[in-house]
Amino acid sequence: MHITLDVLRRFTRLPDDAKATRVLLDEVGIEVKRVDHDAPGVPMTLELLANRGDHHAYNGLATEISGRTGHPVALPEVKPLTVGDSPRELVLDSDLCTVYTLTRLVKKADGQLPAASLDVLASAGLQSIGPVVDATNVAMLELGQPTHAFDAAKVSGAVVLRTARAGEKAWPLFEEGPREIPEGILVVADDEKILAIAGVIGCEESKTTEATVEVLLESAAFDPVSVRKAGRALNIQTDSKARFERGSDFSAPLVGAGRVAHLMEQAGWQVVGTTGQVGAFVDPERTIAFNPEAARTFLDITMDDTELAERLRRYGFKVHDGAGIWDVVVPPHRLWDVEFAADLYEELAKSIGYDNTPIGLPAVDMGAVPSAAERVRFQAEQVLLGHGLYEVITDGFYGRQMPANLGFEEGHPLHAHVETANALDRAYSLLKNNCLAQAVQGVADNLRMNVKQFRAYEFTRTFHPDANAANGLCRERKVLWAAVSGDAQDRTWAGGSRPADAIFLKGIVTELGVQLGLPFTFAPVGDEPGLADALHPGRRLAVELHGQRVGLLGEVHPQVVQAFRIKRARPCYLELDWEALMSPRTSIPYVEPSRLQDVHRSLAFTLPHGIEAGAVARVMTEQGPRWLKSVRMVDLFAHEEEGEPVRTVTYELTYTHDLGERSVDELNAASEALIEAVDQALGGRGVKLR
Amino acid sequence: MSRPDVDTLLSDFRTDLAAASTPEALEDVRRAHTGKKSPLKLALRSLKDLAPDERKAFAQKVNETQKLVETELADARERVQAQALAAQLQAEWQDLSLPGVGVPRGAIHPVTETEREAMDVLRRLGFEVVEGPEVEGPFYNFDALNIPEHHPARDLQDTFWLNGGLLLRSHTTTVQARILEQKPELPLRVAAMGRVYRNEAVDATHLAMFHQFEGIWVDEGLTFAHLKGVLAYIARALFGEERRVRFKPKFYPYTEPSVGVDVACKVCDGEGCQACHGAGWVTILGAGMIHPKVFMQFGFDPEKVSGIAFGLGTTRMAAQRTGVTRIRGLYEPELRVLRTLQRGQ
């Protein structure tokens, strides 16, 4: 809302200094977004509380300030109007309007509003249009009561308050032509047409012009929800709507009309006859039981009863004070937001000043420690960060193209998505059911900025359509994903790094298992359709925990990489069930190391293409003596033999003396036995000792 | 038998010693001049062949010469070792202007960092973390929180609607509703954080998804003074003990009274400057006493039970802390941004 300090001063006393006034307004909850200290009148832009329709007028602002300062509020002059015969027949055919008044004014002479009133218009950034429209606008800005003037010559017959009929059309002001009005919204109509969308906007066919010499002035109390729904349905936002939809003062229509009449009379117009009225507002005199002692305890203040009552009265409350519990009656303009004693405590706190009430911490018995879930995440992060991964945060949704790039056809379990019904942006059409698409997009975006090393992870959620879910729509799955591309480490002067590939991700999973005490194992992915379909079939693995699949990793399928227009990069992706990370730790029994050094022997085998290095290791592990402590792959050399690609893998065997000291002959014999075992098991498939 | 000329032996030794510049050469000199077959040792052995009157004087001379040799050898050893060490050190010069080689560590996201810091503060007050779903029903997002249908407050939170009348939560206050619904034992001190969604056109300052952090403290006898105390504690812990804090009225449907918490602008300390648009203050927290209607919704008696609720926009706070002006950048996996925040390059 736009105001000027000069106009606001007419309504209540303010500090001389604009800066102090700004502080005062902030103190009462009227946020000043901007002040132009050098402009005439000192314009201010205010941000008002969403529930306070009464703040949308100088009178309301002044009342709020008065509650804090105690200075009185000065109201503008209002012509007293008498309710009697209506200038037109009035028909109230809807309960969406509580009070409707109609006052007839005729033009006696040319004129315009006084300069002081035009200042009010200017303070809100409104242009002067003519005395009739100006008067309604000024009254609204001053008192918060929207009014509307119809050209009486354009109104045929009775004025009826009713709901719009199916297929009915209206021509709202400033629009190029009539349009269909949704059935059921409240309208003001005559015998032939709709005169106005009640509380929202007038219509072209009854609007006043320079030629108008007689007007019918409407001032009413409309149902806030009705006005709000109508405005939304028609996509029309007006000052009138903003005030009505927050709840107007139902006792104010006659006062508002009286203010307009007063202003128009100064511009050469005259009220003719009495004011017609249909409906009536009966003040419910909402009464709140108010315990002054409870208020003092709540605010931790020692203010006496007299002052408490006086401060509440500043806001318009009727206070029936005395011993014990008081009755506090809510004024009509606050029926919309004051209902409980807590509301009155707020009024008192504002009156005293939020900064002026005491402050104190409640007693705290003891602090809290991170939950098990938080601790697990902290530990997992140590591994991820230690591998140079950055935490990223991606959107919970994406556009349709994003999952399309993964190539999942209809019928694939990841084809279906939860869809947003009203997204303003197409990029938010679908709730994501996977994180792979955004991860690969991240690689692509970074490559476009020439960032080749991509190492990122995220703890997040995906959404999966499931009619059997508790909410009847979808399951939320918590996942940890990581994606890498480029080198495993930044290149340095000391030499290059190996690629950040699926093996790198496998290493991360292994370290996560060590850190979290979870014995992750790896297995082939299998044929079941799923996210693995977007990974390279020859470079992917399932991650298992106690035989249950809890994730997968692998290189992104070349076709997916191509769909994201990535060249010269091979992104790899890891996904783990977040819940799986919360599994109980598997404790590792401690075995005291031998006093004697372990003995190491190395064996190198040449493997044809397609034979896994792990197969050789498995044979040796399974068939080695109990004192074979470990079999580690410590070197890999890819080369050709007889024109065929082969790999030579070096295995480091570690023998322990834990189970008794071994002689060199025993160790050598054990190694020979392992060579024999590998030959027996895999020699037929081309594996041979190097 | 003629006596060896000890002076000549010493002279020869000194000549050899002067020529020795390495530890190895020095060892050769030592062996040659003090070893079992060295001339000096032979000279000593020849004593028995001398006449008694000559023997004593000659022995004395040989011994003195031997001591001289040993002393000079020791000095030379020290000198040569020093020279050798100096040469080694010079040869082993390493260009330490080269950057260090380590495994560069990644970094957690600024929003997570902000959440952690806020939670560290709240843990001191006994708060624990709770979670809730992101796909919600309007009851938990609106109705239970005193935001009835067609209330203007719903406009403040433009909502992403889903099929079946569900929605994406527009604030983390939904978790508050779900926790109260469980009728927990009091006192209740919990915090929720995470993604929230607003159906807004995205620009430099508006996001369709961002992060919020929320806490509630429910107990008997909590007062407005307690609310202010908790808020000031949080504000000062997060923004510095010296930062001035002020409270102002706000409107949130689920709290009454509602409070906004400002801290003095870091640049102007409350005087008003360009950075704070002349306000002098920056709003960091929204808070209030839990609304009686919210308590009644879940069967609590607001006459007996009161509650403190507060929330902060962790995304905006992270942006303020880091200086990131294009907030959208925080939600793109752009490693340049994250790396720059962590390492400055």
Image (cartoon, coloured by chain):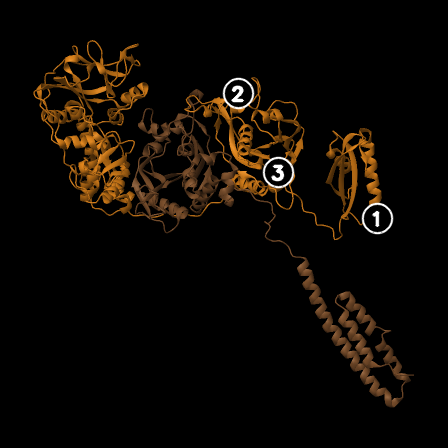
Whether residue A454 is situated above or below residue A494 in the rendered picture: above
Say whether disc 3 or disc 1 marks the residue closer to the N-terminus: 3
> Residue at horizontal 75%, vertical 51%?
A597
The residue that disc 3 covers is A487
Label 2 to label 1, Cα distance in Å?
64 Å
Q: In the image, which disc is placed on residue A416?
A: 2
Residues tagged by mark 3 and mark 1 found on one chain of the structure: yes
Q: Earlier in the sequence, mark 3 or mark 2?
A: 2
> Which of the 4 quarters of the picture holds residue A153?
top left
Q: Amino acid at mark 2?
A: Ala
Whole-percent x, y for residue A513 in the image: 62, 39
Q: Chain of mark 1?
A: A
Residue at 74%, 73% (x, y): give it: B74
Q: Which chain is orange?
A: A
Point out the tag, 2 or 1, that comes first from the N-terminus. 2
Rendering colour (chain B)? brown
Q: Position of residue B289 (x, y in %)?
A: 33, 38
Using the rendered image of the protein, determine whether residue A92 is visible from the camera's viewpoint: no
